[in-house]
Amino acid sequence: MRAVLQRATSASVTVEGRVVGRIEQPGLVVLLGITHDDGPDQVAWMVRKIRDLRIMREERSVADLGAPVLVISQFTLYGEARKGRRPTWQAAAPGEVSEPLYRAVCDGLENLGTHVERGVFGADMTVELANDGPVTLLLES
């Protein structure tokens, strides 16, 4: 499982012209990619890391601040472009594997008291954010 965490002052995700997720205060935007061998252990690790990592201002975490998180599924995090000019997505898990794990990450964060906004799994989304810092980290479980 891979995630790109971007600290943001605000962010939104739109599908077909309709805003489906939005944070309007400092929080995190999480782009989440899932591979074939991910499961409950990777979900639990990722949930704790997203919630507790001290990457917010003044070395605080989402949990410390009660900050919101916008989670967006992003299979392209497992894109491979070393050969040729056309990337391959073979390392990304198919939707029937990755969608339940994406939902499990979102649900896990919510179960710990984090306010979670979501993209729409598998949709063509437009993501807008105001980077705070900018701070961007790549996590891999």
Image (cartoon, grey):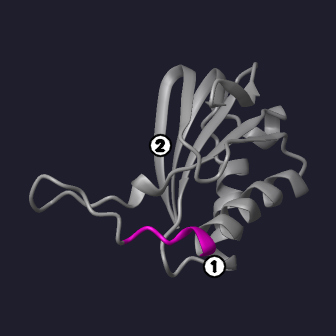
Judged by depth in the image, the label closer to the viewer, 1 or 2, is 1
Q: Residue furthest left?
A: 84
Q: Tell which of 123 and 114 is nearer to you.
A: 123
Which is nearer the N-term, disc 1 or disc 2? 1
- Residue 139 in the image: x percent, y percent? 49, 55
User: Residue type at mark 1?
Assistant: Gly
At 35% from the left and 71% from the top, the residue drawn is 90
Q: Main secondary structure of the magenta part?
A: loop
Secondary structure beneath dot 1 equals loop
Measured Cα–Cα span from mark 1 to mark 2: 22 Å
| Residue 47 location, quadrant | bottom right
Q: Which residue is mark 2?
A: 137
Q: Residue furthest bottom?
A: 37
| Residue 78 location, quadrant | bottom left
User: Residue type at mark 2?
Assistant: Leu
At 51% from the left and 20% from the top, the residue drawn is 133
From what the image shows, is residue 103 above or below residue 16?
A: below
Report whether 95 appears left or right of 114. left
CA neighbours of label 2 inside 10 A, class few (<14), some (14 to 19), many (20+): few
Question: What segment carries the magenta color?
Answer: 91-96
Secondary structure beneath dot 2 equals strand
- Residue 27 in the image: x percent, y percent? 70, 30
From what the image shows, is residue 65 above or below residue 131?
A: below
From what the image shows, is residue 136 above or below residue 49?
A: above
Q: Tell which of 94 and 129 is nearer to you.
A: 94
At 56% from the left and 76% from the top, the residue drawn is 38
- Residue 82 in the image: x percent, y percent? 15, 60
- What label sits on residue 39 in the rendered view? 1
CA neighbours of label 1 inside 10 A, class few (<14), some (14 to 19), many (20+): some
